[in-house]
Image (cartoon, rainbow, N blue to C red):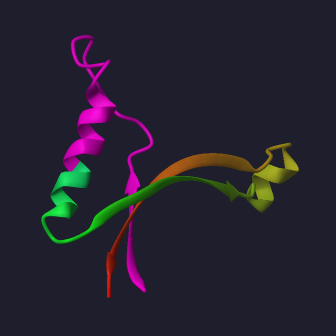
Amino acid sequence: MYEYKMIQIPRTLQVTAKTQDTALASLMQDLVNQHAVDGWEFYRVDSLSVMVPAGCLTALFGARETYTQYSVVCFRKPR
């Protein structure tokens, strides 16, 4: 049996031209190493979509629901 922990990754990552090729990998490496210290093992990354319906008034003017994609890092450790 495992215990699981989920960490949401920021949707956007601001980078410089110098770090654009390695910024995401560095973020993930730091995140995994930070949680490994506490005994958490990296398990996987999941992509989830969230739908937000248009409000009543904005729907009257043709607004539609919006979808946003999120990534979540899953860690696990034995109970």
| Residue 69, position as x, y percentages in the image | 59, 46
Of residues 14 and 38, which is closer to you in this image?
Answer: 38
Left or right: 21 in relation to 34: right
Left or right: 2 in relation to 69: left
Q: Which residues are magenta?
A: 1-30
Of residues 47 and 76, which is closer to you in this image?
Answer: 76
Left or right: 22 in relation to 75: left
Rendering quarter of residue 1: bottom left
Q: Is residue 57 above or below residue 6?
A: above
- Taking the magenta stretch, the answer to whether it contains residue 24 is yes
Q: Identify the residue shown where x is 30% and y is 64%.
A: 41
| Residue 71, position as x, y percentages in the image | 49, 50
| Residue 34, position as x, y percentages in the image | 16, 57
Q: Identify the residue shown where x is 68% and y is 57%.
A: 52
Q: Identify the residue shown where x is 20% and y is 71%.
A: 39
Total numbered labels: 0
Of residues 59 and 68, which is closer to you in this image?
Answer: 68
Q: Is residue 53 above or below residue 23?
A: below
Of residues 17 and 32, which is closer to you in this image?
Answer: 32
Indicate the quadrant containing the C terminus: top left, top right, bottom left or bottom right: bottom left
Left or right: 13 in relation to 44: left
| Residue 9, position as x, y percentages in the image | 39, 50
Q: Residue furthest left?
A: 37
Q: Identify the residue shown where x is 26% and y is 40%.
A: 27
Rendering quarter of residue 20: top left
Rendering quarter of residue 19: top left
